[in-house]
Image (tube, rainbow, N blue to C red):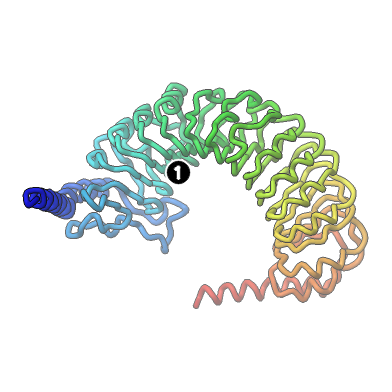
Amino acid sequence: MEYQKLLIAFCFYSLFVQQSQLTYAGKHLYPRDQAFYLLQFKQGLTIGRNVHYYCDEDTHAKTFSWNVTGDCCEWDGVTCNGFTGHVIGLEISSSCLSGTIHANNSLTKLVHLQRLNLAFNYLDDFPLGNSISELTSLTHLNLSDSGFLKGKMIPPGLSKLSKLISLDLTWNFIQVGQTTLTSLLHNLTNLEVLLFRNVHAPFELPKNFPSSLRKLSLEGTDMFGNITDSQLFHLPNLQVLRLGWNPLITGILPNFNWSFSGSILELDFSHTGIFGKVPDSVGNLHSLCYLDLSSNSLSGSIPESFGNLTAITELRHTGNNFTVSVLSSISKLNKLVHLDLSNNHFQGSFPESIGNLTNIIKLTLQCNNFTVWPTMYLWSLNLENNFLQGPLHQSICDLYNLQVLILAQNNFSGSIPGCLGGFVFLLEKPKWYVNFAEDIAQQIAANKRTRQKKRRQRKMN
């Protein structure tokens, strides 16, 4: 019995000593080398207040705190493993950094690095080039809007980072070769987030997206193909799918139970080449919060099944060929905040039932054939280019939160209600196609000047 107690005590002692040594090493030995590598990395870049639109006099460049006397684990933007002391994270986005991170940069020595965020800086080329493959522990890489010049290429070595979970290359206007893209999708089997907005990839929609994907953004990539039978609708874990601004992506939305119907949160098919009717199966997307079908060739009516999208907060249908005003289903969407039905062929009265959607703050109905004024509590109302006529509806006086009101290209007559001149808020973009009293116009202009003056005074204080 005594022997067993002694053995247990010895085991605990050994574990304590081992942990103490590791903690000591983590705080004093490992960071000493890592600090040197980080300072070398810093030395290769310059800090400038004008290198990026996110950089101004109020921007805090995280690398300012990096110096030879400090503990690198306490530097801004640096994260260390609390047990081993290894640097595992570099979060130095919006740090006004510019220059080139060459292939032989000391950054490659940080072999335990898991997260690297260089977003919103201004680098001359893809950091580390093909040597990015040496950071084999990387799970999260964010290089969005980092200043890569148009025409630069994504290095093939990126496809060797098999542990990547999140890859963000948005707004860099760089190019990816078809072979590199195929390798990326084939090798990065753990990838959950792939953000390629404005990455030039003029290829057919790939057919080998990893099933682990939760968030996929391919906006403005110049990809093409027919989405009707696309693998995209069979990704079981997908929550966000954005394909907007790819006019060569065509086809009709499939009318079946999409594999991700229970998990999808956002869908963006805007400015593509899809056509036909919106299928009733869209109503199966019960978790959907955002849907953008703008600027396509969709026609017919809005399906009654839209009433099932009770989680949706933003709905954009602008610039299609909807001709039948079946809008009653939208009145069931109680969480709706932004509704855009502009540039269609809706006509007649705006359904009174939609006035019950008390969460809507932005309503855009321009370029339709509506003839009756909607009564809602709004922050922004755009009714430009409809067939509204007669005096301005008195219910506008109840829109206490209104800041943007656009009524141009209608057939109003008479004067603007006096209540508008008494409002203390700023009416932005006051575009009117109506004869209105000059004194009211002067009052609105005076309110605008007062609001601007108060804003300047707040900034000075």
- Which residue is more in the foreground, 278 or 250? 278
Is 100 situated above or below 459?
above
Q: Could you tell me which residue is drawn at 69 percent across and 30 percent down?
A: 253
- Which percent across, then down, holds residue 381? 75, 58
Give the SS element for disc 1: loop
Q: Residues within 10 Å of mark 1 (few under 14, many from 20)?
A: many
Is 205 situated above or below 286?
above
- Which percent across, then down, holds residue 293? 69, 39
- Which residue is more in the foreground, 38 or 258? 258
- Please give the residue where the numbered disc 1 appears in the rendered image: 144
Q: Quadrant of residue 77?
A: bottom left
- Which percent across, then down, holds residue 251? 68, 26
Pick out the residue farthest to the front. 1
Q: Quadrant of residue 48?
A: bottom left
Residue 235 in sight here: yes
Q: Could you tell me which residue is drawn at 45 percent across and 31 percent down?
A: 151
Looking at the image, residue 213 sits to the left or right of residue 393; the answer is left
- Which residue is more in the foreground, 394 or 281? 281
Q: Amino acid at mark 1?
A: Ser
